[in-house]
Amino acid sequence: MDAVVVSNLVKKFNSFAAVNGISFSVKKGELFGLLGPNGAGKSTTIYMLTTLIQPTSGTAVVNGFDIQSQSDKVRESIGIVFQDQTVDTRLSAYDNLDIHGRMYGMDAESRREKIDEVLQLVELTEWKYKEVKTFSGGMRRRLEIARGLMHTPDILFLDEPTLGLDPQTRRHIWSYIEKLKEMGITIVLTTHYLEEADYLCDRVAIIDHGKIKVLDTPRALKSAIGGNIISISSREPQRLSDLFIRKRICDKTRISETVVSFETKDGAKLVPKVMEIALKEGIGVESIEVHMPSLEDVFIYYTGASIRDEKGAESDFVARRRRHGY
Amino acid sequence: MAIEISKVYAVWLREVKRFTNSKSRMIGSLGMPLLFLIALGGGFSAMVPGYNYQAFILPGILAMTILFTSVFSGVSIIWDREFGFLKEMLAAPASRETIVIGRTLGGATTAILQGTIILVLGIFVTGTPIPTIESLAAIFALMIIFSCFLVAIGIAFASVVQEVETFQLIMNLLIMPLFFLSDALFPIDKMPGWLRAVSVFNPISYAVDGLRGLLINASQFGIMFDFGVSIAALIISITVATYLFSKTSI
Protein backbone atom coordinates (compact mmCIF):
# COMPACT_ATOMS: atom_id res chain seq x y z
CA MET A 1 0.00 0.00 0.00
CA ASP A 2 1.25 3.46 -0.84
CA ALA A 3 1.47 6.06 1.92
CA VAL A 4 -0.05 8.80 -0.20
CA VAL A 5 -2.11 8.46 -3.38
CA VAL A 6 -3.14 11.69 -5.07
CA SER A 7 -5.66 11.55 -7.90
CA ASN A 8 -6.30 14.53 -10.09
CA LEU A 9 -6.31 17.05 -7.27
CA VAL A 10 -7.52 20.56 -8.13
CA LYS A 11 -7.73 23.69 -5.99
CA LYS A 12 -9.13 26.87 -7.46
CA PHE A 13 -9.25 30.29 -5.84
CA ASN A 14 -12.05 31.92 -7.80
CA SER A 15 -10.87 31.31 -11.35
CA PHE A 16 -7.18 30.91 -10.53
CA ALA A 17 -6.14 27.25 -10.33
CA ALA A 18 -3.36 27.09 -7.75
CA VAL A 19 -3.27 23.31 -8.15
CA ASN A 20 -4.46 22.16 -11.53
CA GLY A 21 -5.03 18.42 -11.61
CA ILE A 22 -2.05 16.66 -10.08
CA SER A 23 -1.64 12.94 -9.49
CA PHE A 24 1.18 11.07 -7.80
CA SER A 25 1.87 8.34 -5.26
CA VAL A 26 4.33 8.22 -2.41
CA LYS A 27 5.64 4.83 -1.32
CA LYS A 28 5.92 3.83 2.33
CA GLY A 29 9.23 4.97 3.80
CA GLU A 30 9.98 7.15 0.82
CA LEU A 31 11.30 10.70 0.96
CA PHE A 32 9.25 12.43 -1.70
CA GLY A 33 9.89 15.97 -2.87
CA LEU A 34 7.66 18.54 -4.52
CA LEU A 35 10.03 20.94 -6.22
CA GLY A 36 8.88 24.18 -7.73
CA PRO A 37 9.13 27.97 -7.60
CA ASN A 38 7.10 30.11 -5.21
CA GLY A 39 3.44 30.01 -6.14
CA ALA A 40 3.73 26.73 -8.05
CA GLY A 41 1.06 25.15 -5.85
CA LYS A 42 3.28 23.21 -3.44
CA SER A 43 1.90 24.59 -0.19
CA THR A 44 -1.66 24.43 -1.45
CA THR A 45 -1.10 20.74 -2.20
CA ILE A 46 0.27 20.18 1.31
CA TYR A 47 -2.71 22.06 2.84
CA MET A 48 -5.09 19.78 0.96
CA LEU A 49 -3.23 16.60 1.90
CA THR A 50 -3.19 17.65 5.55
CA THR A 51 -6.95 18.43 5.42
CA LEU A 52 -6.52 22.14 6.21
CA ILE A 53 -8.26 23.15 2.99
CA GLN A 54 -10.77 21.34 0.84
CA PRO A 55 -9.91 20.46 -2.75
CA THR A 56 -12.11 21.90 -5.49
CA SER A 57 -12.12 18.50 -7.15
CA GLY A 58 -10.15 15.27 -7.20
CA THR A 59 -9.14 13.30 -4.16
CA ALA A 60 -6.26 11.89 -2.18
CA VAL A 61 -5.75 9.01 0.20
CA VAL A 62 -3.26 9.57 3.00
CA ASN A 63 -2.24 6.58 5.10
CA GLY A 64 -5.26 4.72 3.74
CA PHE A 65 -7.71 7.46 4.72
CA ASP A 66 -9.62 9.74 2.38
CA ILE A 67 -8.67 13.39 2.97
CA GLN A 68 -12.28 14.54 2.74
CA SER A 69 -14.44 11.85 4.29
CA GLN A 70 -11.90 10.68 6.91
CA SER A 71 -10.07 13.89 7.72
CA ASP A 72 -9.88 13.13 11.47
CA LYS A 73 -8.10 9.84 10.80
CA VAL A 74 -5.73 11.59 8.42
CA ARG A 75 -4.91 14.23 11.03
CA GLU A 76 -4.15 11.68 13.70
CA SER A 77 -1.70 9.78 11.53
CA ILE A 78 0.32 12.64 10.07
CA GLY A 79 2.76 15.23 11.34
CA ILE A 80 3.05 18.66 9.75
CA VAL A 81 5.86 21.18 9.80
CA PHE A 82 4.55 24.34 8.25
CA GLN A 83 6.49 26.77 6.14
CA ASP A 84 5.94 29.64 8.54
CA GLN A 85 6.47 29.56 12.25
CA THR A 86 3.61 28.03 14.23
CA VAL A 87 5.17 27.41 17.63
CA ASP A 88 3.92 29.56 20.50
CA THR A 89 6.83 31.86 21.34
CA ARG A 90 5.37 32.78 24.72
CA LEU A 91 5.54 29.18 25.90
CA SER A 92 8.58 27.03 26.66
CA ALA A 93 9.72 24.29 24.30
CA TYR A 94 8.37 21.80 26.82
CA ASP A 95 4.93 23.40 26.93
CA ASN A 96 4.71 23.58 23.16
CA LEU A 97 5.42 19.87 22.89
CA ASP A 98 3.29 18.93 25.89
CA ILE A 99 0.22 20.77 24.64
CA HIS A 100 0.73 19.27 21.19
CA GLY A 101 0.87 15.78 22.75
CA ARG A 102 -2.35 16.45 24.65
CA MET A 103 -4.08 17.68 21.47
CA TYR A 104 -3.14 14.35 19.86
CA GLY A 105 -4.52 12.37 22.80
CA MET A 106 -1.20 11.16 24.23
CA ASP A 107 -1.10 10.06 27.87
CA ALA A 108 1.22 11.65 30.46
CA GLU A 109 3.90 8.98 30.36
CA SER A 110 4.24 8.79 26.59
CA ARG A 111 4.29 12.58 26.44
CA ARG A 112 7.15 12.75 28.91
CA GLU A 113 9.17 10.09 27.10
CA LYS A 114 8.50 11.50 23.67
CA ILE A 115 9.36 15.08 24.64
CA ASP A 116 12.82 13.96 25.74
CA GLU A 117 13.24 11.84 22.64
CA VAL A 118 12.31 14.48 20.09
CA LEU A 119 14.23 17.24 21.86
CA GLN A 120 17.29 15.04 21.81
CA LEU A 121 16.84 14.34 18.13
CA VAL A 122 16.89 18.04 17.25
CA GLU A 123 19.51 18.82 19.93
CA LEU A 124 17.38 21.16 22.00
CA THR A 125 17.47 19.22 25.26
CA GLU A 126 19.20 22.04 27.13
CA TRP A 127 16.51 24.44 26.01
CA LYS A 128 13.61 22.34 27.23
CA TYR A 129 12.24 24.86 29.72
CA LYS A 130 13.28 28.04 27.92
CA GLU A 131 10.66 30.31 26.39
CA VAL A 132 10.65 29.96 22.60
CA LYS A 133 10.88 33.72 22.05
CA THR A 134 14.54 33.47 23.09
CA PHE A 135 15.22 30.91 20.31
CA SER A 136 16.98 31.67 17.02
CA GLY A 137 15.24 31.01 13.70
CA GLY A 138 17.07 27.71 13.26
CA MET A 139 16.19 26.55 16.76
CA ARG A 140 12.52 27.38 16.21
CA ARG A 141 12.57 25.35 13.01
CA ARG A 142 14.08 22.43 14.87
CA LEU A 143 11.40 22.72 17.52
CA GLU A 144 8.75 22.71 14.80
CA ILE A 145 10.22 19.48 13.45
CA ALA A 146 10.36 18.00 16.95
CA ARG A 147 6.73 18.90 17.47
CA GLY A 148 5.73 17.35 14.15
CA LEU A 149 7.25 14.08 15.39
CA MET A 150 5.79 14.27 18.88
CA HIS A 151 2.82 11.97 18.23
CA THR A 152 4.87 9.44 16.20
CA PRO A 153 3.21 10.08 12.83
CA ASP A 154 3.47 7.57 9.99
CA ILE A 155 3.85 10.37 7.48
CA LEU A 156 5.57 13.69 8.01
CA PHE A 157 4.80 16.68 5.79
CA LEU A 158 7.56 19.26 5.63
CA ASP A 159 6.64 22.48 3.86
CA GLU A 160 9.86 24.28 2.87
CA PRO A 161 11.75 22.98 5.91
CA THR A 162 14.84 25.13 5.39
CA LEU A 163 13.26 28.30 4.00
CA GLY A 164 15.26 31.35 5.00
CA LEU A 165 17.86 29.46 7.01
CA ASP A 166 21.61 29.95 6.67
CA PRO A 167 23.58 27.21 4.86
CA GLN A 168 24.99 25.74 8.05
CA THR A 169 21.60 25.42 9.74
CA ARG A 170 20.21 24.02 6.51
CA ARG A 171 22.80 21.20 6.58
CA HIS A 172 21.79 20.54 10.16
CA ILE A 173 18.11 20.23 9.27
CA TRP A 174 19.02 17.96 6.38
CA SER A 175 20.82 15.62 8.73
CA TYR A 176 17.70 15.42 10.97
CA ILE A 177 15.56 14.68 7.94
CA GLU A 178 17.95 11.91 6.94
CA LYS A 179 17.70 10.48 10.45
CA LEU A 180 13.91 10.46 10.18
CA LYS A 181 14.15 8.61 6.90
CA GLU A 182 16.36 6.00 8.53
CA MET A 183 13.67 5.60 11.19
CA GLY A 184 11.31 4.58 8.38
CA ILE A 185 9.02 7.60 8.42
CA THR A 186 7.47 8.49 5.08
CA ILE A 187 8.32 12.10 4.32
CA VAL A 188 6.71 14.46 1.83
CA LEU A 189 8.61 17.69 1.54
CA THR A 190 8.23 20.77 -0.59
CA THR A 191 11.14 22.96 -1.53
CA HIS A 192 12.24 25.49 -4.06
CA TYR A 193 15.89 24.74 -3.33
CA LEU A 194 17.16 22.47 -6.08
CA GLU A 195 20.15 21.23 -4.11
CA GLU A 196 17.81 20.29 -1.27
CA ALA A 197 15.61 18.16 -3.49
CA ASP A 198 18.70 16.65 -5.13
CA TYR A 199 20.41 15.86 -1.85
CA LEU A 200 17.47 14.53 0.16
CA CYS A 201 14.75 13.11 -2.03
CA ASP A 202 14.28 9.58 -3.30
CA ARG A 203 11.94 10.92 -5.94
CA VAL A 204 11.13 14.43 -7.04
CA ALA A 205 8.06 15.85 -8.74
CA ILE A 206 8.76 19.12 -10.52
CA ILE A 207 5.67 21.26 -10.15
CA ASP A 208 4.98 24.51 -11.94
CA HIS A 209 1.78 26.51 -12.44
CA GLY A 210 -0.15 23.90 -10.49
CA LYS A 211 0.87 20.98 -12.66
CA ILE A 212 3.44 18.22 -12.32
CA LYS A 213 5.88 18.52 -15.21
CA VAL A 214 7.95 15.42 -14.51
CA LEU A 215 8.41 12.91 -11.70
CA ASP A 216 11.38 10.61 -11.13
CA THR A 217 14.49 10.03 -9.04
CA PRO A 218 16.93 12.95 -9.16
CA ARG A 219 19.48 10.70 -10.89
CA ALA A 220 17.03 9.59 -13.58
CA LEU A 221 15.86 13.15 -14.12
CA LYS A 222 19.41 14.33 -14.64
CA SER A 223 20.51 11.52 -16.94
CA ALA A 224 17.34 11.82 -19.02
CA ILE A 225 18.35 15.18 -20.39
CA GLY A 226 21.64 14.04 -21.91
CA GLY A 227 25.30 13.58 -21.14
CA ASN A 228 26.71 17.04 -20.50
CA ILE A 229 25.81 20.66 -20.57
CA ILE A 230 28.13 23.11 -22.30
CA SER A 231 27.81 26.73 -21.24
CA ILE A 232 29.62 29.40 -23.20
CA SER A 233 29.86 32.95 -22.01
CA SER A 234 30.13 35.50 -24.81
CA ARG A 235 29.33 39.12 -25.72
CA GLU A 236 27.23 37.92 -28.64
CA PRO A 237 25.24 34.99 -27.27
CA GLN A 238 22.49 35.21 -29.89
CA ARG A 239 24.90 35.12 -32.84
CA LEU A 240 26.75 32.25 -31.25
CA SER A 241 23.53 30.36 -30.69
CA ASP A 242 22.41 30.80 -34.30
CA LEU A 243 25.81 29.67 -35.46
CA PHE A 244 25.75 26.47 -33.42
CA ILE A 245 22.35 25.52 -34.74
CA ARG A 246 23.36 26.30 -38.32
CA LYS A 247 26.49 24.21 -37.97
CA ARG A 248 24.50 21.34 -36.41
CA ILE A 249 26.48 21.41 -33.18
CA CYS A 250 23.17 21.09 -31.38
CA ASP A 251 19.42 21.20 -32.04
CA LYS A 252 18.53 23.91 -29.61
CA THR A 253 20.22 26.24 -27.20
CA ARG A 254 19.18 28.27 -24.21
CA ILE A 255 20.35 31.82 -23.66
CA SER A 256 20.47 33.30 -20.20
CA GLU A 257 22.00 36.80 -20.21
CA THR A 258 25.45 36.32 -21.80
CA VAL A 259 25.54 32.54 -21.52
CA VAL A 260 24.58 30.10 -24.27
CA SER A 261 24.01 26.53 -23.07
CA PHE A 262 23.08 23.32 -24.75
CA GLU A 263 22.99 19.61 -23.99
CA THR A 264 25.35 17.20 -25.69
CA LYS A 265 26.55 13.62 -25.38
CA ASP A 266 30.25 14.18 -24.87
CA GLY A 267 30.94 17.79 -23.95
CA ALA A 268 34.70 17.66 -23.46
CA LYS A 269 35.31 16.47 -27.03
CA LEU A 270 33.13 19.22 -28.42
CA VAL A 271 34.98 22.10 -26.72
CA PRO A 272 37.80 22.51 -29.34
CA LYS A 273 35.24 22.47 -32.14
CA VAL A 274 33.08 25.06 -30.45
CA MET A 275 36.10 27.31 -29.96
CA GLU A 276 37.17 26.90 -33.56
CA ILE A 277 33.75 27.81 -34.94
CA ALA A 278 33.46 30.84 -32.71
CA LEU A 279 36.95 32.12 -33.59
CA LYS A 280 36.37 31.66 -37.31
CA GLU A 281 33.33 33.91 -37.10
CA GLY A 282 35.19 36.36 -34.91
CA ILE A 283 32.93 35.95 -31.88
CA GLY A 284 34.81 36.44 -28.66
CA VAL A 285 34.37 33.71 -26.06
CA GLU A 286 34.93 34.75 -22.45
CA SER A 287 34.65 31.35 -20.82
CA ILE A 288 33.49 27.87 -21.57
CA GLU A 289 32.27 25.29 -19.12
CA VAL A 290 31.30 21.65 -19.37
CA HIS A 291 29.27 20.17 -16.55
CA MET A 292 26.98 17.31 -15.64
CA PRO A 293 23.33 18.31 -15.71
CA SER A 294 22.15 19.55 -12.34
CA LEU A 295 18.58 19.47 -11.12
CA GLU A 296 18.53 23.13 -12.10
CA ASP A 297 19.12 22.10 -15.72
CA VAL A 298 16.34 19.56 -15.40
CA PHE A 299 14.10 22.23 -13.99
CA ILE A 300 14.87 24.62 -16.84
CA TYR A 301 14.44 21.85 -19.36
CA TYR A 302 10.92 21.04 -18.19
CA THR A 303 9.60 24.46 -17.17
CA GLY A 304 11.44 26.67 -19.62
CA ALA A 305 12.58 28.99 -16.86
CA SER A 306 15.20 29.07 -14.16
CA ILE A 307 13.77 28.64 -10.69
CA ARG A 308 15.56 31.81 -9.66
CA ASP A 309 13.97 33.85 -12.45
CA GLU A 310 10.52 33.38 -10.99
CA LYS A 311 8.92 36.45 -9.55
CA GLY A 312 7.01 36.29 -6.30
CA ALA A 313 3.86 37.77 -7.79
CA GLU A 314 1.94 34.57 -7.92
CA SER A 315 2.83 33.51 -4.42
CA ASP A 316 1.75 36.91 -3.11
CA PHE A 317 -1.55 36.37 -4.83
CA VAL A 318 -2.01 33.00 -3.19
CA ALA A 319 -0.96 34.36 0.19
CA ARG A 320 -3.45 37.17 -0.09
CA ARG A 321 -6.22 34.73 -0.97
CA ARG A 322 -5.27 32.61 1.96
CA ARG A 323 -5.40 35.49 4.40
CA HIS A 324 -8.86 36.51 3.37
CA GLY A 325 -10.20 33.01 3.69
CA TYR A 326 -11.63 30.78 1.07
CA MET B 1 -16.16 14.58 16.35
CA ALA B 2 -17.32 15.12 19.87
CA ILE B 3 -15.95 17.54 22.40
CA GLU B 4 -13.07 15.81 24.12
CA ILE B 5 -12.37 16.91 27.67
CA SER B 6 -8.64 16.18 27.55
CA LYS B 7 -8.26 18.31 24.42
CA VAL B 8 -10.40 21.09 25.88
CA TYR B 9 -7.97 20.96 28.78
CA ALA B 10 -4.99 21.23 26.41
CA VAL B 11 -6.40 24.40 24.81
CA TRP B 12 -7.27 25.78 28.25
CA LEU B 13 -3.80 25.02 29.53
CA ARG B 14 -2.20 26.92 26.69
CA GLU B 15 -4.29 30.03 27.39
CA VAL B 16 -3.55 29.97 31.09
CA LYS B 17 0.18 29.31 30.60
CA ARG B 18 0.47 32.15 28.14
CA PHE B 19 -1.18 34.42 30.64
CA THR B 20 0.82 33.38 33.69
CA ASN B 21 4.05 33.57 31.65
CA SER B 22 3.34 37.23 31.06
CA LYS B 23 3.50 38.96 34.42
CA SER B 24 3.55 42.44 32.88
CA ARG B 25 0.28 41.80 31.08
CA MET B 26 -1.25 40.54 34.28
CA ILE B 27 -0.31 43.64 36.25
CA GLY B 28 -0.79 46.09 33.36
CA SER B 29 -4.38 45.15 32.75
CA LEU B 30 -5.28 45.93 36.36
CA GLY B 31 -4.16 49.55 36.02
CA MET B 32 -7.16 50.98 34.21
CA PRO B 33 -9.86 49.40 36.42
CA LEU B 34 -8.05 50.56 39.55
CA LEU B 35 -7.76 54.11 38.18
CA PHE B 36 -11.47 54.16 37.41
CA LEU B 37 -12.33 52.84 40.84
CA ILE B 38 -10.03 55.03 42.87
CA ALA B 39 -9.84 58.27 40.87
CA LEU B 40 -13.24 58.40 39.17
CA GLY B 41 -15.07 56.72 42.02
CA GLY B 42 -13.29 58.77 44.66
CA GLY B 43 -13.88 62.01 42.75
CA PHE B 44 -17.59 61.51 42.29
CA SER B 45 -18.03 60.34 45.87
CA ALA B 46 -16.60 63.66 47.05
CA MET B 47 -19.01 65.60 44.79
CA VAL B 48 -22.10 63.89 46.15
CA PRO B 49 -21.67 63.86 49.92
CA GLY B 50 -23.36 61.04 51.76
CA TYR B 51 -23.42 58.75 48.73
CA ASN B 52 -20.79 56.00 48.38
CA TYR B 53 -20.36 56.19 44.62
CA GLN B 54 -17.21 54.07 44.83
CA ALA B 55 -19.15 51.17 46.30
CA PHE B 56 -21.80 51.71 43.62
CA ILE B 57 -19.35 51.42 40.72
CA LEU B 58 -17.32 48.52 42.15
CA PRO B 59 -19.56 45.97 40.35
CA GLY B 60 -19.20 48.09 37.20
CA ILE B 61 -15.42 48.12 37.50
CA LEU B 62 -15.42 44.39 38.18
CA ALA B 63 -17.43 43.91 34.98
CA MET B 64 -15.03 46.23 33.16
CA THR B 65 -12.02 44.16 34.19
CA ILE B 66 -13.69 40.98 33.00
CA LEU B 67 -14.95 42.69 29.85
CA PHE B 68 -11.47 43.80 28.76
CA THR B 69 -9.61 40.61 29.58
CA SER B 70 -12.28 38.30 28.18
CA VAL B 71 -12.85 40.05 24.87
CA PHE B 72 -9.10 40.44 24.30
CA SER B 73 -8.55 36.81 25.08
CA GLY B 74 -11.12 35.76 22.48
CA VAL B 75 -9.90 38.28 19.94
CA SER B 76 -6.30 37.09 20.38
CA ILE B 77 -7.15 34.39 17.83
CA ILE B 78 -6.31 37.14 15.35
CA TRP B 79 -2.77 37.18 16.72
CA ASP B 80 -2.61 33.41 16.61
CA ARG B 81 -3.52 33.61 12.97
CA GLU B 82 -0.85 36.23 12.35
CA PHE B 83 1.87 34.39 14.27
CA GLY B 84 0.95 30.97 12.94
CA PHE B 85 -0.16 29.10 16.03
CA LEU B 86 -3.72 28.90 14.75
CA LYS B 87 -2.50 26.49 12.06
CA GLU B 88 -1.18 24.16 14.74
CA MET B 89 -4.58 24.19 16.42
CA LEU B 90 -6.56 23.75 13.21
CA ALA B 91 -4.32 20.91 12.02
CA ALA B 92 -4.73 18.95 15.25
CA PRO B 93 -7.25 16.10 15.44
CA ALA B 94 -9.64 18.14 17.58
CA SER B 95 -13.07 19.44 16.66
CA ARG B 96 -13.70 23.16 16.27
CA GLU B 97 -16.13 22.94 19.19
CA THR B 98 -13.35 21.58 21.37
CA ILE B 99 -11.12 24.49 20.47
CA VAL B 100 -13.86 27.08 21.06
CA ILE B 101 -14.80 25.61 24.46
CA GLY B 102 -11.15 25.33 25.51
CA ARG B 103 -10.37 28.89 24.55
CA THR B 104 -13.53 30.19 26.17
CA LEU B 105 -12.76 28.49 29.46
CA GLY B 106 -9.09 29.52 29.23
CA GLY B 107 -9.96 33.16 28.61
CA ALA B 108 -12.57 33.10 31.35
CA THR B 109 -10.03 31.68 33.81
CA THR B 110 -7.61 34.54 33.21
CA ALA B 111 -10.43 37.08 33.42
CA ILE B 112 -11.73 35.62 36.70
CA LEU B 113 -8.20 35.72 38.14
CA GLN B 114 -8.07 39.44 37.42
CA GLY B 115 -11.62 39.95 38.55
CA THR B 116 -10.78 38.32 41.88
CA ILE B 117 -7.90 40.73 42.45
CA ILE B 118 -10.14 43.74 41.68
CA LEU B 119 -12.90 42.32 43.87
CA VAL B 120 -10.62 41.90 46.89
CA LEU B 121 -8.90 45.29 46.44
CA GLY B 122 -12.25 46.93 45.67
CA ILE B 123 -13.98 45.67 48.79
CA PHE B 124 -11.24 47.22 50.92
CA VAL B 125 -10.93 50.48 48.99
CA THR B 126 -14.67 51.16 48.84
CA GLY B 127 -15.66 49.85 52.25
CA THR B 128 -18.15 47.42 50.73
CA PRO B 129 -19.29 44.87 53.34
CA ILE B 130 -17.60 41.50 52.90
CA PRO B 131 -20.10 39.22 51.12
CA THR B 132 -21.36 35.98 52.64
CA ILE B 133 -20.11 32.65 51.30
CA GLU B 134 -23.41 32.17 49.44
CA SER B 135 -23.21 35.59 47.79
CA LEU B 136 -19.57 34.98 46.96
CA ALA B 137 -20.43 31.70 45.23
CA ALA B 138 -23.15 33.49 43.26
CA ILE B 139 -20.75 36.34 42.40
CA PHE B 140 -18.24 33.87 40.97
CA ALA B 141 -20.92 31.95 39.09
CA LEU B 142 -22.11 35.18 37.50
CA MET B 143 -18.57 36.30 36.69
CA ILE B 144 -17.85 32.96 34.97
CA ILE B 145 -21.03 33.09 32.87
CA PHE B 146 -20.42 36.73 32.01
CA SER B 147 -16.78 36.11 31.12
CA CYS B 148 -17.49 33.08 28.90
CA PHE B 149 -20.11 35.14 27.08
CA LEU B 150 -17.52 37.83 26.34
CA VAL B 151 -14.69 35.49 25.30
CA ALA B 152 -17.13 33.90 22.85
CA ILE B 153 -17.94 37.35 21.43
CA GLY B 154 -14.20 37.90 20.97
CA ILE B 155 -13.82 34.54 19.20
CA ALA B 156 -16.76 35.32 16.93
CA PHE B 157 -15.20 38.66 15.98
CA ALA B 158 -11.76 37.15 15.42
CA SER B 159 -13.26 34.49 13.16
CA VAL B 160 -14.73 37.11 10.87
CA VAL B 161 -12.27 40.00 10.89
CA GLN B 162 -8.80 38.64 10.39
CA GLU B 163 -6.49 41.62 10.18
CA VAL B 164 -4.41 42.58 13.16
CA GLU B 165 -5.14 46.24 12.37
CA THR B 166 -8.76 45.75 13.41
CA PHE B 167 -7.69 45.16 16.99
CA GLN B 168 -7.97 48.85 17.86
CA LEU B 169 -11.27 49.01 16.02
CA ILE B 170 -12.70 46.27 18.21
CA MET B 171 -11.56 48.19 21.26
CA ASN B 172 -13.28 51.39 20.12
CA LEU B 173 -16.38 49.98 18.49
CA LEU B 174 -17.11 47.02 20.73
CA ILE B 175 -15.61 47.19 24.18
CA MET B 176 -15.96 50.90 24.95
CA PRO B 177 -19.62 51.17 23.83
CA LEU B 178 -20.48 47.96 25.71
CA PHE B 179 -18.98 49.47 28.84
CA PHE B 180 -20.26 53.04 28.68
CA LEU B 181 -23.72 52.21 27.31
CA SER B 182 -24.52 50.16 30.40
CA ASP B 183 -25.32 50.70 34.05
CA ALA B 184 -21.68 50.16 35.04
CA LEU B 185 -21.08 53.79 35.98
CA PHE B 186 -24.60 55.22 36.39
CA PRO B 187 -27.73 53.95 38.09
CA ILE B 188 -30.23 52.90 35.45
CA ASP B 189 -33.17 54.76 37.08
CA LYS B 190 -31.26 58.07 36.99
CA MET B 191 -30.15 57.78 33.37
CA PRO B 192 -31.46 59.99 30.57
CA GLY B 193 -34.17 58.13 28.68
CA TRP B 194 -32.14 57.42 25.53
CA LEU B 195 -29.26 55.92 27.52
CA ARG B 196 -31.62 53.76 29.52
CA ALA B 197 -33.26 52.59 26.28
CA VAL B 198 -29.86 51.48 25.00
CA SER B 199 -28.62 50.07 28.29
CA VAL B 200 -31.52 47.67 28.78
CA PHE B 201 -30.52 45.95 25.55
CA ASN B 202 -26.91 45.62 26.66
CA PRO B 203 -26.16 42.27 28.32
CA ILE B 204 -23.40 43.95 30.33
CA SER B 205 -26.09 45.86 32.26
CA TYR B 206 -27.52 42.63 33.66
CA ALA B 207 -24.16 41.24 34.74
CA VAL B 208 -23.39 44.52 36.49
CA ASP B 209 -26.86 44.64 38.04
CA GLY B 210 -26.54 41.10 39.31
CA LEU B 211 -23.13 41.82 40.85
CA ARG B 212 -24.54 44.99 42.37
CA GLY B 213 -27.41 43.05 43.89
CA LEU B 214 -25.01 40.50 45.35
CA LEU B 215 -22.45 43.03 46.62
CA ILE B 216 -24.50 46.01 47.87
CA ASN B 217 -28.04 44.73 47.56
CA ALA B 218 -28.98 47.28 44.90
CA SER B 219 -30.33 45.24 42.00
CA GLN B 220 -32.83 46.93 39.71
CA PHE B 221 -33.92 43.95 37.64
CA GLY B 222 -33.73 41.19 40.24
CA ILE B 223 -30.80 38.79 40.55
CA MET B 224 -32.62 35.80 39.08
CA PHE B 225 -33.54 37.84 36.02
CA ASP B 226 -29.91 39.01 35.69
CA PHE B 227 -28.73 35.40 35.75
CA GLY B 228 -31.34 34.45 33.18
CA VAL B 229 -30.31 37.17 30.73
CA SER B 230 -26.60 36.38 31.22
CA ILE B 231 -27.11 32.66 30.59
CA ALA B 232 -29.19 33.37 27.49
CA ALA B 233 -26.50 35.74 26.21
CA LEU B 234 -23.86 33.08 26.82
CA ILE B 235 -25.75 30.39 24.93
CA ILE B 236 -26.29 32.68 21.96
CA SER B 237 -22.71 33.94 21.82
CA ILE B 238 -21.11 30.51 22.17
CA THR B 239 -23.34 29.13 19.42
CA VAL B 240 -22.46 31.99 17.10
CA ALA B 241 -18.75 31.75 17.98
CA THR B 242 -18.66 28.02 17.27
CA TYR B 243 -20.44 28.49 13.98
CA LEU B 244 -18.19 31.31 12.81
CA PHE B 245 -15.01 29.65 14.04
CA SER B 246 -15.87 26.45 12.19
CA LYS B 247 -15.98 28.55 9.00
CA THR B 248 -12.58 30.08 9.63
CA SER B 249 -9.61 28.94 7.64
CA ILE B 250 -5.86 29.21 7.92
Image (spheres, helix red, strand yellow):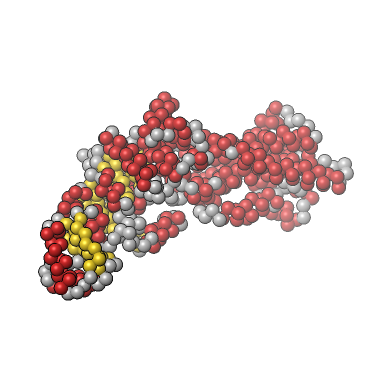
Image side of residue A278 versus residue A47, left or right: left
State the image coordinates of residue A198 (x, y, percent, origin top left).
Answer: 25, 48
Image side of residue A283 versus residue A162, left or right: left
Total marks placed: 0
The front one of A3 and B236 is: A3
State the image coordinates of residue B250 (x, y, percent, origin top left).
Answer: 43, 50
State the image coordinates of residue A158 (x, y, percent, origin top left).
Answer: 34, 44
Q: Quadrant of residue B230?
A: top right
In the rendered image of this protein, does residue A195 appear above or below residue B52?
below
Q: Residue at x 43, y 40 (%)?
A: A139
Residue furthest to the right in view is B49
Q: Residue at x 74, y 30 (%)?
A: B131
State the image coordinates of residue B221 (x, y, percent, origin top left).
Answer: 71, 43
Q: Quadrant of residue B109?
A: top right
Q: Residue at x 32, y 42 (%)?
A: A174
Q: Quadrant of the C terminus of chain A?
A: bottom left
Query: Does the image show residue B140?
Result: yes
Q: Quadrant of the N terminus of chain A?
A: top left
Image side of residue A291 versus residue B115, left or right: left
In the rendered image of this protein, does residue B127 appear above or below residue B168?
above
The front one of B66 and B230 is: B66
